[in-house]
Amino acid sequence: MIKSLNRRKLSRASSHRRALLRNLATSLFLHEKITTTYPKAKELSIFAERLLTSAGPGDLNARRRVFADIKDVVVGKKIFDVLVPRYEKKLCGRIAVYKAGYRKSDNAAMAVIALL
């Protein structure tokens, strides 16, 4: 059985896609719930779960790994002061993606992505 090992390309170049995921993750950690298109939400859930997992130890190396992707200092502090203690016993499943219908203008599938 042939399986796709690649992620969604989201019709963007790799640098633009990485910047998009960083910005969406920053908004998600700041507001704890955002609305976006369904494919972006699925990719963001993978990206954000990895960030929260790498932030788990809370040491200097973890801070450097998180701040390499999250450029906002306020959001970085929130990750280590609020979110990491909240999810310290939970290994996965910290982010939920809910389908939210279709966008009126172009009929794109929308989703709400939230921290649990």
Image: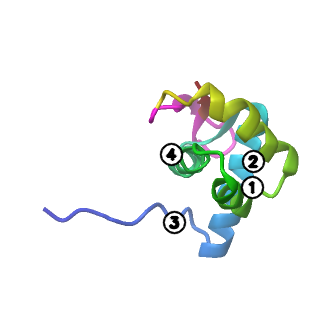
Callout 4: helix, strand or loop?
helix
Give x and y (percent) for residue 77: 80, 42
Q: Earlier in the sequence, mark 4 or mark 2?
A: 2
Q: Earlier in the sequence, mark 3 or mark 2?
A: 3
Q: Amino acid at mark 4?
A: Lys
- Is 103 placed above or below 14 here? above
Q: Residue at x 58, y 43 (%)?
A: 56
Badge 4 local density, few (<14 within 10 Å), some, or many (20+)?
some
- Is 49 placed above or below 19 here? above
Q: Quadrant of the C terminus?
A: top right
Question: How far apart are the two marked residues, 4 and 2, measured between alpha carbons?
Answer: 16 Å
Q: Amino acid at mark 3?
A: Lys
Per the image, is 93 magenta?
yes
48 displayed left or right of 60: left
Q: Which of pointers 4 and 2 indicates the residue nearer the eye?
A: 2
- Asked if residue 6 shows in the view, the reply is yes
- Residue that numbered label 4 is attached to: 42
Q: Nearer the viewer, residue 55 or 101?
A: 55
